[in-house]
Image (cartoon, helix red, strand yellow):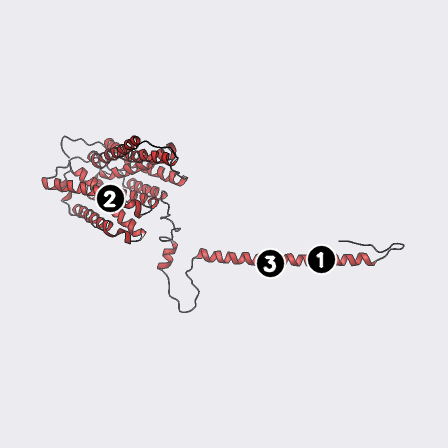
Amino acid sequence: MAPHFTQSLPMCYGLSAIGGILEVGSIAVLAVPDAREKEGTPISTWLSMVTLASNVSMQLIGSLSSNLIAPWFGPVSVVAPIYFSATLVFNLIIFGFILGLEFFDRIMIVGTYVIAIGTVLLQVVGPGIQNGQDIGELLGHSYALSWFLFLLVSMVVSTIIMVTSIKKYGEYKRIAILLIARSTSYTLNLTVSRAFLLNPDHFVLISFIVIKVVSGAIYTYAIVVQSTAVKQAKFIPLNATTIILLNAITGVIIWEDWRVISSWVGYVCVFLLLALGCDLLLSANLLTNDNAELGRAKLMRRFQLERSSGSRNLYSDIADYEGEVENQNIAVNKDADLLTSADTQRKESTRRIAWKEVLSTGKSEGQGAVSWEY
C-alpha cells in the first residue's frame, strides 16, 4: 500500500453501503414518476429530465464509491456482501415500506433480514486490514496468478457466448452464462481497483486500467442482457450469492485473507447465512426437493432401471399415482353411498307397507277398519 494512504475498515464498510443505497435511489427516482404516469398523473418534461439526470448521477457516484474507492480502504471480500445487503435492505425499505410500489411477502422480508444479519456478523469475524501488501508479490505466487487468469479467461469466454449466441440456449444455461460473466467481471473489477495502490509497475498499471474499464463495460452490458434473457426473481439472488462467494474465494487466494480472518467457523457460517438468505428471496425452491429440475424428479430420471417385462411405468410421479388412487377411492365411496341410500329407502318402504297391512286388517268390535294415508 502506498505510504501516504491509510486503510480504514469503517470507511470500506461505509463506502460499500453507500454504493448499494445509491443504486436503489437511482432506480427509485425513475420508478416514482413512472408509477404516477400509470396512475394518470402527467409528468412535465423538465421533471423527467431531472429524474434521468439524478439516476445517472447516483449510479456514477455509487459505482465510484463501492467499486473503485471502497477496496482502497479494506479487503475486497467484504465489499460485495455489504454492497448487496445494503441494496436489498434499502430496496425493502424504500420500495416496500416508504413508497409502497412493491409487495414483499414474509419469506422475502425474512430473507432480507438474514442477509443483513450475516453482513453485520461479517464485520466481526471477517478479514481485517493488511498493510504492506505488494501486488507483484501477491501475483508472484503460482496459485494466485492461476486464479487471476482463470477469472480473466472465464470473463472473456462467457462474454463472447453472451454477445453472440446466448439466446439459443435454455434458461438454466443462460443463467449460468450470465452468472459467470457478471461474477467474474465484478470480482476482477474490485481486485484491480485495490491493486492500483499496491505499487504496480507501469505495464501492470496499464493492464489493470484496461481490465477495469473492460470488466465494468461487461458487467453493465450483462445487466442489459439479463433484463430480457432470464427471470429476474430467480437470477438476482443467485447473482448476489455467486458474486459474494467468488469475492470471498478471491480474497483468500489472491489477497491472503486467511492471514487476518478472526474466526474460520464464523466466516464460513456468515457466507452460509448469505447464501440461505438469497435462497429465501428466490421464487424457485432450489434447496428443496420441490424443484422439478433439481429435486426428486431429476433424481428419479437419473437412476431409472431397465425391466425385462411388464408395461406399467414404475417411475411415474408418486404424487400423481397417489392422486389417481385417491380419485378412484372417492368414486368407489360415492358408488357405495348411492347403494347404501337406495338400500335404506327400499327397507323403509318395506317397513311402511308391513305396518299398514298389520293395522288395516284387524277390526275391533263395533269399529270399522282403520284407514292410513301416507
Look at the picture and state if 170 lies above or below 24: below
Disc nearest the viewer among 3 and 1: 1
- Of callouts 3 and 1, the N-terminal one: 3
* Residue shown at the point (40%, 41%) measured from the top left: 107
Q: Is residue 115 visible?
A: yes
The residue closer to the viewer here, 59 or 207, is 59
Which residue carries the number 1 mark?
Answer: 349
Which residue carries the number 2 mark?
Answer: 221
In the image, is 22 to the left or to the right of 201?
right
The residue closer to the viewer here, 155 or 49, is 49
Instruction: Name the kind of residue labelled 3 in the image.
Output: Ala
Q: Secondary structure at mark 2?
A: helix
Instruction: Name the kind of residue labelled 1 in the image.
Output: Ser
Q: In whole angstroms, how far apart are the C-alphas of marks 3 and 1?
A: 20 Å
Coordinates of residue 170 in the picture (x, y in percent): 31, 53
Coordinates of residue 20 in the picture (x, y in percent): 28, 35
Look at the picture and state if 112 lies above or below 336: above
Q: Are marks 1 and 2 in contact (CB under 8 Å)?
A: no
Coordinates of residue 320 in the picture (x, y in percent): 45, 56
Which residue carries the number 3 mark?
Answer: 336
Q: Outermost residue, right direction? A: 366
Instruction: Name the kind of residue labelled 2 in the image.
Output: Tyr
